[in-house]
Image (cartoon, rainbow, N blue to C red):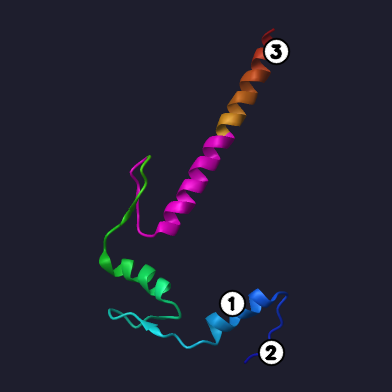
Amino acid sequence: MCEKIFDTINARMFHVKTEHTEAMYLCDQCPTAFISNWNLKQHMEIHSGGKSYICEVCAIMLLFVFFLIIFHFSFYLSLIINVFYFRNAAKDLLGKVA
């Protein structure tokens, strides 16, 4: 083990798992290894060549479900910000006219 110090037990456990645990899940198509089966499955999508996650709103195709979640979050957050901005701008404009 190394001599690193962590603020939380979770940070230490994550460090030990990612830095001091031997990878047990090996990719059969390239020399990459992972410490969890989930990470290997996510990695294998790179080799499949297909974009398997599709947004039902705009039909964008993404390789990882995580990217789709981030896309949705940023898209809808910007949409909400724009709606509030334009609503407030319209109220300001109407208030100045009256």
Amino acid type indicated by mark 3:
Lys
Measuring from the top left, give residue 29's x and y in whole percent. Answer: 28, 79
Q: Which residue is mark 1?
A: 14
Per the rendering, the mark at residue 54 is: none
81 left or right of 26 in image: right
Q: CA distance from mark 1 to mark 3?
A: 56 Å
Where are the magenta residues, as a range?
58-81
Which residue lies most toward the top here?
A: 98
Image coordinates of residue 8 in percent, x first then y, are: 70, 74
Residue that label 2 marks? 3
Q: Residues within 10 Å of mark 1 (few under 14, many from 20)?
A: few
Check disc 1 and give the amino acid type: Phe
Q: Quarter holding the N terminus?
A: bottom right
Nearest to N terminus: mark 1 or mark 3: 1
Instruction: Read off the residue under disc 3.
Output: 96
Residue at x-position 65% and y-position 13%: 94
Q: Give how far apart the Cα atoms at labels 1 and 2 are.
A: 15 Å
- Callout 3: SS: helix
State the SS at label 2: loop
Q: Residues within 10 Å of mark 3 (few under 14, many from 20)?
A: few
For discs 1 and 3, the disc positioned in front in the rendered view = 1
Name the secondary structure under disc 1.
Answer: helix
Dot in front, 1 or 2: 1
Query: Where 45 falls versus 74 (above or below)?
Result: below
Is mark 1 in CB contact (under 8 Å) with mark 2? no
- Whether residue 69 is in magenta: the answer is yes
